[in-house]
Image (cartoon, rainbow, N blue to C red):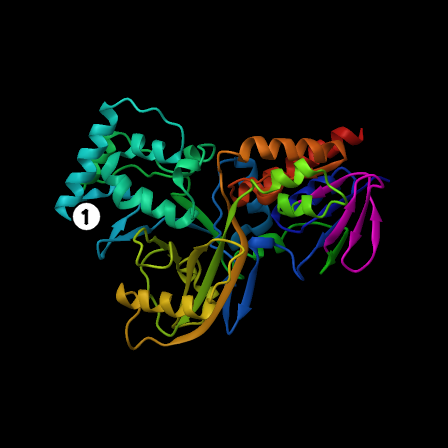
């Protein structure tokens, strides 16, 4: 009987195991944490369900929607997006580029003029910064696109490639922007005008509902991988021998776990960049603190780039009469951060924005530091990932998932990655 070893019980790993077991291929999953789900997991603390990250379900593929609906059934709530941008001391409807009516008159004029001028000019687009200027013009770039993305990515936008922008950033035409400046309602933009969320249990209900059988070993991770002997030394001292090893570990961490990797491979890993995110969860002793699902903050004086309100996704994730909020701060990895100081700064910013009132009491507080949050699509990423994958594949190791493929992806994409890698294993195993 064929056996496949999987490193990581996040959505990609669970999807892989599920699709392999349908073909009678036995899987064994090793998960370094004590629970499944990865970034799509939730914790229950003081009556609040806290998600590790601001994860929502949105679908481009009917078959994935049907699969998830089959798992969650009536536990899946459908929402029409209600998002905003906090800018110039006011809430501007999302997306910014088609909601110029809500801005001060001078700012609105700058944005509209810049958009028109950009469409009349010929641009050479080499990077993300160029793309922003071409697609949106100087005004929208200055007041939203550039500061927000610098805040999120913590990286020079001139060194960010364009592999990811078309599906994730709404691109309006001139009529849409003019309508937005006049306050005329536009069509829905973006990849998530409608999203879904579990009725109870937080987003962690999704991975917990996966019908995966077979052995799952928690608190176990790969310490060293010997490519010549096709074996993995686990952190508990056990050694497993594999024919095929599939990993959802961050790609550079997988390479660093190899025994005697070639120098060029170690050098390649240094080109893989990412940002960490501090996700600060708050429970407030007042209902309806925020009227939106989430809000973006482009301005530099606010420490967070986004806040969200899970109790607007589902009332069951917070006790009655309270509100659940999360605040996301993008951080450069491998640096020491004073989480307590950042938390205080965030709470003060909520008060300055008049989201929190002076009399509000915080009844729950839980910061979660996500070491790996977003991979950076720097100019070296595409070629580097291709070279590393080719080397690993030659040794029967297949790296996939958000961090294994080193991509910016959704939960739906994670399920699809698991499925496609299951098909790969089936093909190579004959």
Res 121 quadrant in image: top left
Residue 225 or residue 198, whichever sits in front: 225
Q: Which quarter of the rendering shows the C terminus? A: top right
**Does 293 appear in magenta?**
no
- Determine which residue is flagged by label 1: 103
> Magenta region: which residues?
221-247
Q: Which quarter of the rendering shows the N terminus? A: top right
The image shows residue 202 at horizontal and vertical percentages of 52, 59
The image shows residue 344 at horizontal and vertical percentages of 38, 70
Residue 66 or residue 262, whichever sits in front: 262
Q: Residue most toward the front?
A: 263
Q: Can residue 127 be seen in this view?
A: yes
The image shows residue 232 at horizontal and vertical percentages of 79, 48
Q: Residues within 10 Å of mark 1 (few under 14, many from 20)?
A: many
The image shows residue 79 at horizontal and vertical percentages of 40, 50
On screen, residue 402 versus residue 191, left or right, reads right
Q: Is residue 97 visible?
A: no
* Above or below 390: residue 415: below
| Residue shown at the point (38%, 43%) measured from the top left | 193
Residue 413 or residue 380, whichever sits in front: 380
The residue tagged with tag 1: helix, strand or loop? Answer: loop
| Residue shown at the point (80%, 52%) measured from the top left | 233
């Amino acid at each position: 009987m064929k056996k496949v070893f999987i490193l990581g019980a996040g959505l990609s790993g669970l999807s892989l195991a599920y699709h392999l077991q349908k073909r009678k291929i036995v899987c064994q999953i090793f998960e370094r944490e004590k629970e499944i789900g990865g970034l799509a997991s939730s914790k229950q603390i003081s009556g609040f369900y806290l998600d590790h990250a601001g994860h929502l379900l949105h679908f481009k593929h009917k078959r994935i929607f049907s699969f998830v609906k089959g798992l969650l059934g009536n536990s899946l709530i459908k929402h029409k997006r209600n998002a905003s941008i906090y800018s110039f001391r006011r809430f501007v409807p999302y997306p910014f580029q088609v909601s110029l009516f809500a801005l001060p008159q001078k700012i609105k004029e700058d944005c509209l003029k810049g958009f028109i001028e950009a469409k009349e000019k010929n641009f050479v687009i080499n990077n993300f910064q160029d793309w922003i200027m071409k697609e949106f013009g100087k005004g929208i770039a200055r007041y939203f696109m550039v500061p927000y993305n610098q805040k999120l990515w913590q990286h020079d936008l001139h060194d960010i490639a364009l592999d990811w922008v078309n599906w994730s950033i709404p691109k309006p035409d001139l009529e849409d922007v003019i309508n937005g400046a006049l306050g005329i309602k536009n069509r829905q933009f973006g990849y998530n005008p409608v999203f879904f969320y579990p009725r109870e249990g937080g987003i962690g209900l999704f991975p917990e509902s996966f019908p995966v059988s077979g052995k799952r070993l928690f608190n176990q991770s790969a310490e060293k991988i010997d490519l010549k002997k096709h074996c993995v030394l686990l952190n508990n001292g056990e050694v497993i021998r594999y024919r095929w090893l599939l990993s959802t570990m961050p790609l550079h961490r997988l390479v660093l776990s190899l025994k005697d990797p070639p120098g060029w491979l170690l050098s390649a890993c240094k080109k893989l960049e990412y940002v960490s995110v501090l996700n600060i969860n708050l429970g407030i002793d007042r209902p309806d603190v925020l009227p939106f699902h989430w809000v973006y903050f482009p301005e530099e004086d606010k420490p967070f780039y986004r806040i969200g309100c899970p109790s607007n996704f589902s009332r069951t994730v917070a006790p009655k009469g309270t509100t659940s909020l999360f605040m996301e701060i993008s951080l450069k990895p491998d640096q020491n951060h004073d989480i307590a100081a950042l938390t205080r700064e965030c709470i003060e910013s909520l008060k300055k924005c008049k989201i929190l009132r002076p009399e509000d009491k915080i009844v729950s507080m839980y910061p979660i530091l996500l070491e790996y949050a977003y991979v950076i699509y720097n100019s070296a990423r595409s070629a580097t990932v291709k070279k590393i994958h080719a080397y690993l594949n030659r040794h029967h190791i297949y790296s996939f998932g958000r961090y294994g493929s080193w991509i910016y992806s959704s939960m739906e994409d994670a399920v699809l990655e698991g499925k496609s890698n299951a098909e790969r294993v089936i093909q190579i195993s004959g």
